[in-house]
Amino acid sequence: MLKKLFKKSLDNNFEAMGINERNVSLIYPNNQRKHYKLADDKVLTKNILETYDIPCAKTYAVIERIGDIIPKWKSIQQYKKIAVKPANGSGGGGIQILTKKEDGWYRNGELYPEESIFMHMANIIMGCFSLGSDDRVLIEACIEPHPFFHEIYPEGVPDFRVILLHGKPIISMLRIPTDISDGKANLHQGGLGIGIDMQKGELLQAHDGQNYHDVHPDNGNQIKGKKIPYWEAIIEISKNTAAHFPLQYLGIDIVIDKTLGPLIMEINVRPGLGIQLANGVGMKVVLS
């Protein structure tokens, strides 16, 4: 479907960039392969962010061995809400949000036995969410989305993606969940991609993979024209992050916590091309 849409866009002088051209003209000349792991591994990413005091979700624990699961789990019981992630996962796979109540831990509103939590962590370590390679469990503070996002869609954790080339932000979008994306903002899981006027810090139309919308297609809440809170801070944090990574072309994912403001979530060495459709403009135009 995406390929057909890009072809249609090309026919309309959209000047979209395809994956091969992106790789050859942007990724390979600007990013050395030895540095990919700094973006692909969330633990390594956070080590850099924390070293340079770049705001990100607080790390509660990192688990490298199955034998460490239970003692590390016992060490974080003071927290009431956590995010459990594979360090090398992608596309939101393997992420679980857990909430602690008096009778135990809950996931998606249902009681979630500790045995199931431990099994999930073991699966992460064994590489079930990282193409079969050994992995680590990252346990960190859970983001509480800023009310701005709830005005558009009340569930999940939306995020901004800012793509930078040589430290300069060149294009960005907001990814936000839908009813079919199960709380995930990822575009390939059904989330919306919303273009951004980077000069005004304002939302443009949303793209659902087929059509454009001025309002959220599930609830009719306004999207187009909404001013983005903390936009100048988001751009500055993006630039600061890019300055401390040896990657000249990268995508930076940022959330806005209701208390802490903008926080870096992930670094992407191969940011997807759906951002072109979200903005209605091809990368060739952006780079010209």
Image: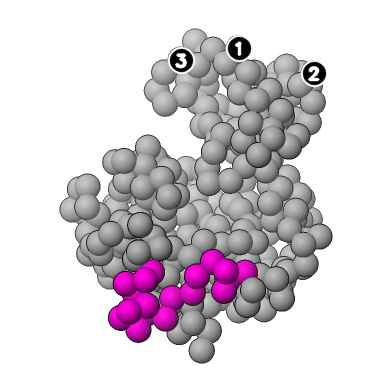
Numbered disc total: 3
The residue at which mark 1 appears reads as 115
Whole-angstrom CA distance, mark 3 to mark 1, is: 12 Å
Residue 214 appears in the figure = yes
Amino acid identity at mark 3: Leu
Would residue 104 be found to the left or right of residue 206 on screen? right
Residue 136 appears in the figure = no
Magenta segment? 6-23
Q: Earlier in the sequence, mark 2 or mark 3?
A: 2
Instruction: Determine whether the residue tagged by mark 1 lies in a helix, strand or loop.
Output: helix
Instruction: Determine whether the residue tagged by mark 3 lies in a helix, strand or loop.
Output: strand
Would residue 50 be found to the left or right of residue 131 on screen? right
Would residue 30 be found to the left or right of residue 197 on screen? right
Find residue 172 and report its horizontal and vertical position in percent: 47, 69
The residue at which mark 3 appears reads as 111
Please identify, in this view, whether the residue under mark 2 or under mark 3 is nearer the observer: 2
Q: Residue at x 56, y 34 (%)?
A: 94
The residue at which mark 2 appears reads as 67
- The reply to whether discs 2 and 1 touch (Cβ–Cβ < 8 Å) is no
Instruction: Determine whether the residue tagged by mark 2 lies in a helix, strand or loop.
Output: helix
Find residue 118 and report its horizontal and vertical position in percent: 64, 18
Please identify, in this view, whether the residue under mark 3 or under mark 1 is nearer the observer: 1
Amino acid identity at mark 1: Glu
- Camera-side residue of 230 and 167: 167
Q: Is residue 240 magenta?
A: no
